[in-house]
Image (tube, grey):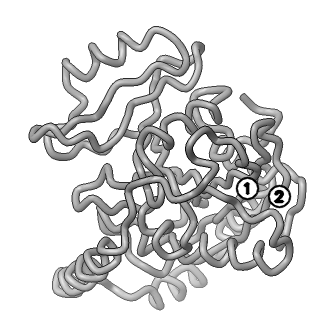
Amino acid sequence: MQLVLQPVGQKCKILRAVAQEHITAMTAHDASRVMANVPVQTDEVFEEIHKKWESEQQELKKKLVLENTESWQSDLDGLRCVGGVDVSFVKTSSTLACASLVVCDYPDLKVIYSDCELVHLDTPYIPGFLAFREVNFFLNLLHKLRDKEPNLMPQVILVDGNGILHPRGFGIASHLGVLSGIPCVGVAKTLMQVDGIAKNEQFAEKVAELGSGGDTFPLMTDSGQILGMALRGCHKSRNPIFVSVGHRISLETATKLARRCCRYRVAEPVRQLVTGPETR
């Protein structure tokens, strides 16, 4: 289903509501039949999946590029299309969700394309391996866009998640970037606590020192490696977002782009996925 120039956040809410009504209308007998068809994941199965995914993750990571590769990235001149992707869940269901893609023009940040679809999550969630559950939905949406409106393909994608700010340095923004070949940036709303990066007293002090919208501080590991930046998106919101390199972009450019895409706390292409343009 293509939803051109429509509030994708609202459309996704409608899809989730329809799915929710269907779930609510199910009789207990229907529900038991559905649950009977859901495979039970044993500890042994999870361990096998974990090993397989970790191996695939490490292979994909070899293709990761952590620097600028595009001419527009030096000063954002020539950047026209910025994408955003996210998955939102249907209440009371652990297997139904809405995968969404928007493309905003730059620098105006008006939505010029949007698409969403109800998806079935038949892959288990394992912390640190979110991409294996969600990334194929984003790739499908990108393929649909390329087929129908190739001139609106995003030159960079902001992902509601992390890039190299990740236990193995390869979060969903990196995964999507490598598989799609498109520069990607992680713009997470929740801090990934890894390698000494933690929500402790020192972190709280640094957040308090973010005096105005656009202010940042580095997210540094115990060994001194900077994995991302905490960014205060706007003056009205004291809670930062967490920017990290996904693929084919430098941290400096990723941070600059995220800053310029923030009118509120969350970068606009991602915010549109959740709220639609009317909601702040």
280 up-or-down from 24: above or below: above
42 up-or-down from 265: above or below: below
Query: In the rendered structure, are the residues bearing label 2 and label 1 in contact, judged by CB atoms less than 8 Å apart?
Result: yes
- The residue pinned by badge 2 equals 113
- Give the residue at the far left of this rendering: 223
Q: Residue at x 57, y 51 (%)?
A: 158
Specify the amino acid type for callout 1.
Val
Secondary element at image label 2: strand
Q: Residue at x 19, y 18 (%)?
A: 201
Specify the amino acid type for callout 2.
Tyr
Q: Residue at x 53, y 34 (%)?
A: 256
> Quadrant of the image for the C terminus?
top right
Badge 1 density bin: few <14, some 14–19, many ≥20, Cα 10 Å = many
When asked about the image quadrant of residue 221, the answer is: top left
When asked about the image quadrant of residue 275, the answer is: top right
Secondary element at image label 1: strand
Which mark identifies residue 102? 1
